[in-house]
Image: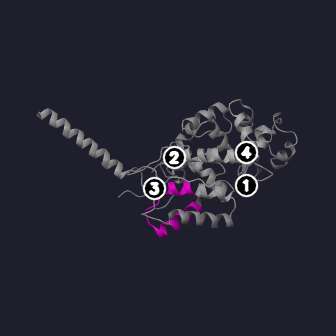
Amino acid sequence: MGAKALFFFALLCFSAASAFAENEEDPGLVMNFYKDSCPQAEDIIKEQVKLLYKRHKNTAFSWLRNIFHDCAVQSCDASLLLDSTRRSLSEKETDRSFGLRNFRYIETIKEAVERECPGVVSCADILVLSAREGIVSLGGPYIPLKTGRRDGRKSRADLLEEYLPDHNETISAVLDRFAAMGIDTPGVVALLGAHSVGRTHCVKLVHRLYPEVDPALNPDHVPHMLHKCPDQIPDPKAVQYVRNDRGTPMVLDNNYYRNILDNKGLLIVDHQLAYDKRTRPYVKKMAKSQDYFFKEFSRAITLLSENNPLTGTKGEIRKQCNLANKLH
């Protein structure tokens, strides 16, 4: 073998060794990532979510919203949880995060995990696993999810508009934004089934009531909405809202699809979902079958939870979920 060939052979071996070392270091997301470093982690998170749910039922809605608001914005890296600093605005404090709450209880879960295994479990994994347990608390399916995410160091408040689907956008725009995360049409229809629980603040729906009532709304549903949202310009600090599903407001079920087919969806996107020819067949199928809804919902949550995570040596493991670690 000539000197030149020997050089290229050595280079090839070095590249392969580097790639192997990198893979050894970064397995990416895997099932039960903490089985050796913190075997109790998932059980502690599950227990904490259950305890918090007993005391504050609305925490389960918060966990479910968190996964959407964090993972849909470029990466599942718990950037949502960071407080504002002198240099950057927190995602939590933007208009698009209106109504998000219970962040202090994420700290409660983090503290419980830290007592068992200091500096091991990321806030990004706590956010994702608390969403999974919140879904179970609401009567939804148990979804096996991978772990191994690490925490980002910066807020992505400036990117929210670019990435986060909005309830006032056209259904085409919503489908496109989710498609960019690898979530297909039945997946989008299933994810919006999260509107089966919780509530919608009047701020988000008064444009369908004033100055004229949107003729697409079921007239039997309108008096209730007007009663709950009596002001054309609601005070954002006042807690004025309409429950998303008056029948089973605390249960994640397929009632949402029956409601939107009956023109009782509160948001524009709910109405579009029921009537757009791309989404309507899936809405009808989910209205008929809770099993089908749960299957597609589980698949979509899995894809959302795996959107562009930081793994290996990227990012960090925050000591507190609302603050990036101090760099020495």
* Relative horizontal placement of residue 121, taking residue 296 as reference (left or right): left
Locate residue 251, reporting x and y percent: 73, 54
Mark 2 — residue?
A: 306
Q: Which amino acid does label 3 sit on?
A: Ala
Q: What residue type is labelled 4?
A: Ser
Badge count:
4
Q: How far apart are marks 4 and 1 (CA)?
A: 15 Å
Q: How far apart are marks 2 and 1 (CA)?
A: 25 Å
Specify start and end residues of the magenta stretch as a single range.
105-129
Q: Quadrant of the C terminus?
A: bottom left
Mark 4 — residue?
A: 289
Q: How crowded is mark 3: few (under 14 residues within 10 Å), some or many (20 or more)?
A: many
Residue 258 in the magenta stretch? The answer is no
Q: How far apart are marks 4 and 2 (CA)?
A: 26 Å
Camera-nearest label, 4 or 3: 4
Q: Which amino acid does label 2 sit on?
A: Glu
Mark 4 or 3, nearer chain start: 4
Camera-nearest label, 3 or 1: 1
Locate residue 67, reporting x and y percent: 58, 50
Camera-nearest label, 2 or 3: 2
Q: Residue 88 carries which label?
A: none
Residue 121 in the magenta stretch? The answer is yes
Camera-nearest label, 4 or 2: 4
Q: How far apart are marks 3 and 1 (CA)?
A: 35 Å
Residue beneath the point at 63% across and 52% down: 64
Mark 4 or 2, nearer chain start: 4
Residue beneath the point at 75% across and 45% down: 256
Question: Which element type, helix, strand or loop, lies under badge 1?
Answer: loop
Mark 1 — residue?
A: 251
Q: Which colour scheme is used?
A: one colour
Mark 4 or 1, nearer chain start: 1
Mark 3 or 1, nearer chain start: 1
